[in-house]
Image: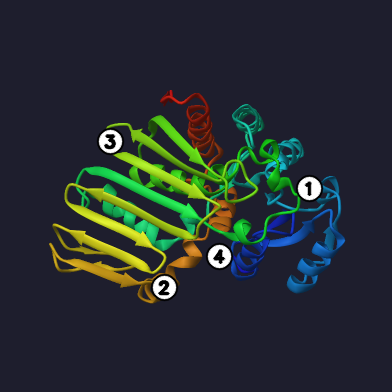
Amino acid sequence: MSGGEKRRLRAGLAACGGISNLTLQAAAASPDFQVTAIQDPRAEALERAGSRYGIAARHRRFEDLLQEDIDFVIINSPNHLHAEQAEQALARGKPCLVQKPLAPALAAARALVESARRAGLPLGVMMFEHGVPLHHQVRDMVQCGWLGEPTLLQALSAHDIYLKSPPPADDWRRDPGKVGGGAFIQLAVHHINLARWLLGREITCAAMLGAGGHTVFADESDVLSVLFAGGPAAQFAASYAAKASHFLLAGTRGTVHITEAGVLVRGATPYRGPVFDYEQAGGERFYTRAELEERSRPLLERCEVHGRFARWIRDGEAFECTAESALRDMQVIDAAYRSRDAGRVIFIE
């Protein structure tokens, strides 16, 4: 290693199913970290991931993963194992990057954050939205005042995977206690975290309604209405009974509407950025996914969230997806479910 070259940190990955391929692909391309050990109770999952990515250290037990010479742990396990495994890792002096949510319940999330604070170790939460260069540009558009004063935010996250192929009865996703709820905690938390980060404001009150009857899930479709401190008003919707996604942020001087097909922009002034240039003030401009991806490609490495967590540990670089921020997400999720169950607005301290 040359004098100016920084060491790639070694990570251990817990659980090789779900979206673990995104982590393993990121590691293969990253100059900042590599996955050198994996763990999963299923032998076939270990064999598949280990063979595909050339990882020899494979373990069935999480305790054995912690014996490896690793710099941090990435926890991709089912929701109900997040806090338990992170507590074990922290006790062994290992920083953790945990898949959302921190825990199924707010109390367990609070306890985990306190454990990390006492240990003096980095604890982060995986939020892929922070790895999207477009979102970094939108944040700058908000912070520099291009949008004007934010007034309205609407977000929808829905997939129909379980509508078509319900999980088996013994799958952890069918157990609200293990999940922490259902569609809302699994899907809407991404947009809640993104909105808080873009606006730099916290949610102060929440009111949610829910509906169902199309899938095996009781928590199937929900719409949460909230107010942010100082505005704007916002709605977050999530469903297991549809396939759709969008994120709309409107202000007194401009609007950005992110959809699956691209981004629709309209504003009072031009804006030049790394992902797109808005040049005709007052006009409406649509940027396709292909256009956005071409401009985003050189920026992906610096934005990628696992790598940024590694640089937080190694270099002290700023990292927004902290456990403290994820705890605030959990407070909003907790208030949303309490509001739905009680039929009233819940205020968040």
Distance Cα–Cα, label 3 vs label 2: 31 Å
4 vs 3, front mark: 3
Tell me the kind of residue under disc 3. Answer: Gly
Q: Which disc is residue 28 wearing?
A: none
Picture coordinates of residue 265 (x, y %)? Answer: 25, 62
- Looking at the image, the residue that sits furthest to the front is 213
Q: Nearer the viewer, residue 270 or 218?
A: 218
Residue bearing mark 4: 4
Residue 293 has which mark? 2
Find the distance from the CA under tag 4 to the CA under tag 3.
46 Å
- Using the numbered discs, state the Cα–Cα distance from disc 1 to disc 2 in whole angstroms: 39 Å
Q: Residue 261 at x, y = what percent?
A: 39, 69
Mark 1 falls on what kind of element? loop
- Tell me if I can see residue 104 in this picture: yes
The numbered disc on residue 231 is 3
Residue tagged by mark 1?
Answer: 170
Label 3 or label 2, whichever comes before in sequence order: 3
Callout 2: SS:
helix
Where is residue 243 drawn, in percent x and y?
49, 60
Whether 27 is drawn above or below 334: the answer is: below
Residue 318 visible here:
no
Q: CA distance from mark 4 to mark 2?
A: 31 Å
Classify mark 2: residues with Cα within 10 Å, few (<14), some (14-19) or many (20+).
some
Identity of the amino acid at label 1? Answer: Asp
Q: Earlier in the sequence, mark 3 or mark 1?
A: 1
